[in-house]
Amino acid sequence: MGLGVITSKTFLCLLSLIYLASASGLFYVALKVILTYRQYAEFLGNYYVTLPAVVILFIAVIMLIIGFFGCFAIVQESSFGLGCFMFLTSIIFAAGITGLVLGLIYKDKIDPELDENMNKLFQEYDGKSPQSSPVDFMQEQLQCCGVKNYTFWHNSTWQIASKNNSVPYSCCRKNATNCTGNLTNMEKINTAGCEDILETLVHKVLEYSLYVILGFAVLEFFGLISICVITCRGSRNGYQLL
């Protein structure tokens, strides 16, 4: 058996084990992206932010199947198993590249839509209506206040209605005691704007998912090369149609 075949079989064994071990990690990454989107769906608008997550979920499911086929093909030296392994690897490789391209295309479209949706919801905020809940949730979770900063509330619908020099209670710092949102106690209020913080969070999660897709696309590419090496020399190395 040639060195190339031995190396290829060894790499495929390792790749199959990596597929099985990494599927759970991919599920975690995809769910994290989806949950992040669901928490701030009112601000993010369209669903294209979750495209990489959907691709990762698809890859994770197929990866479990591929891992089993890969182990079967290598241990049993089955040309049928190897063919299935190659077919499924090709599918997730193509899906990964597609997800990577779509993620890069839509990445730059997040900020303008985020700015538009955020300004609209913040302007409608009155502290009582159901539309106010997402704003309070985000300000509490991200520890921020206003769109660009806390001064957003100076000429807002909230300020006109309340007629006092204050911001919503959700702008209060986590550990602040007796915080009423009054601007006379600035040390108890978050002053940073929510837009920049949310943009950073969404871009970070999206970039992380794209790096994951890229990493596995590289592994899959070398896996396909290894399969081709074994297939080309399969007739001389004992592979049977099982």
Image (spheres, helix red, strand yellow):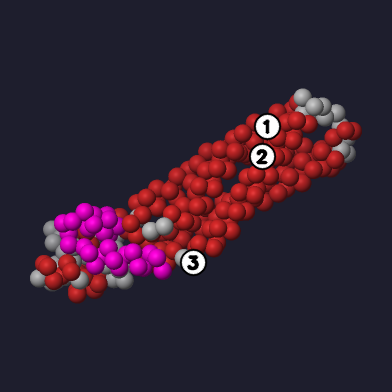
Q: Which amino acid does label 3 sit on?
A: Asp
First-in-chain label (1 vs 2): 1
Task: Judge left or right: residue 188 versus residue 48.
Answer: left
How far apart in space, not on screen, are marks 3 and 2 (Cα)?
31 Å
For residue 37, side relative to residue 20 (left or right): left
Label 3 vs 2, first from the N-terminus = 2
N-terminal-most mark, 3 or 1: 1
> Gap between marks 3 and 1, in whole Å?
38 Å
Magenta span: chief secondary structure? helix
Q: Which of 86 and 215 is in front in this view?
A: 86
Asked if the residues shown at circle 1 and circle 2 are in contact, with their CB atoms under 8 angstroms apart, the answer is yes
Residue 45 lies, with reference to residue 28, above or below; the image says below
Judge the density around disc 2: few (<14), some (14-19), many (≥20) Cα neighbours within 10 Å. Answer: some
Can you say which quadrant of the picture contains the N terminus?
Answer: top right
Q: Give x and y (percent) for residue 237.
A: 86, 32
Does dot 1 land on a helix, a strand or a loop? Answer: helix
Tell me where the magenta segment starts and ends, as one range: 112-139
Residue 129 percent across, percent down from the top left:
18, 56
State the residue at coordinates (75%, 30%): 80
Q: What residue type is labelled 2?
A: Leu
Which residue does the numbered mark 1 point to in the structure image?
69
Return the residue at label 2: 88
Q: Which label lies toward us, 1 or 2?
A: 2
| Residue at 73% across, 31% down | 81
Q: Which mark is residue 93?
A: none
Label drawn at residue 108: 3
The residue positioned farthest toward the right in the image shown: 236
- Position in image of residue 109 (x %, y %): 46, 65
* Amino acid type of the residue that numbered disc 1 sits on in the rendered structure: Phe
Q: In this view, does 131 lie to the left or right of 203?
A: left
Report whether residue 13 is seen: no
